[in-house]
Image (spheres, rainbow, N blue to C red):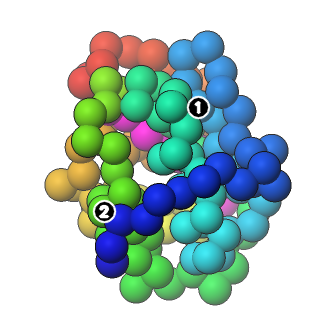
Amino acid sequence: MKKVEQEIDPDLTEQITIKNDYILIEPDEFDLLELICLIGNLLALPEFKSKPNIWILREEVKNLSYSDLLKLKEFSKKNFPESITHHKTAFVAESVYQRAMADAYRGISIEMPVKYKVFSSLEDAEEWVREGKNA
């Protein structure tokens, strides 16, 4: 997969909120194409380099397989900014299946320059991303 020049899609920006100390991502859809577009938008934001991320996984996963997770990781890896100052991404999973998918993604993304962690509440995720940079 080659690195793509991503322009920010205004339709997807409604799913991304820049908070004071992190970026909140709340996907409307949860399939491979929609996630690739959303990740592309996220990586194109200037704030991405300095703020950790929290993903709220509310929608049930639609047609997302383990091989799709590998594709998402490869897309992220190829398009990841070279210099970032944050090193955390939290997933807040509301269902057992979402938690399993988030845990699977965390497991295959060990070599990424960020640490991934899965939570069941937004409050716990916020606490974790606010801790020291590499805790």
For the residue marked with disc 2, what is the amino acid? Lys
Dot 1: element: strand
Tell me the quarter of the picture where residue 14 sits. top right
Which one is in front in this view, the residue at disc 2 or the one at disc 1? Answer: 2
**121 in magenta:** no
- In the displayed structure, 89 sits above or below 96; it is above
Residue 36 on image: x %, y %: 55, 67
Residue 34 on image: x %, y %: 66, 70
**88 in magenta:** yes
Q: Which residue appears at 64% of the width and 35% of the height?
A: 24
Residue that protrudes farthest toward the left in the picture: 111
Quadrant of the frame with the N terminus: bottom left
Dot 2: element: helix
Few, some or many residues within 10 Å of mark 2 (<14, 14–19, 20+): few
Residue 120 on image: x %, y %: 59, 42
Q: Which residue appears at 45% of the width and 16% of the height?
A: 130
- Residue 78's tag is 2
Regarding residue 1, the answer to whether it shows in the image is yes
For the residue marked with disc 1, what is the amino acid? Ile
- In the displayed structure, 116 sits above or below 128; it is below
Few, some or many residues within 10 Å of mark 1 (<14, 14–19, 20+): many
Give the magenta range: 87-95
Point out the tag, 2 or 1, that comes first from the N-terminus.
Answer: 1
Residue occupied by mark 1: 23
- In the displayed structure, 93 sits above or below 115; it is below
Asked whether, in this view, residue 100 is left or right of residue 134, the answer is right
Report the front residue among 106 and 41.
41
Quadrant of the frame with the C terminus: top left
Q: Which residue appears at 30% of the width and 59% of the height?
A: 77
Callouts 2 and 1 close, C-beta under 8 Å: no
Measure how far apart labels 2 and 1 are at the Cα level.
Answer: 21 Å
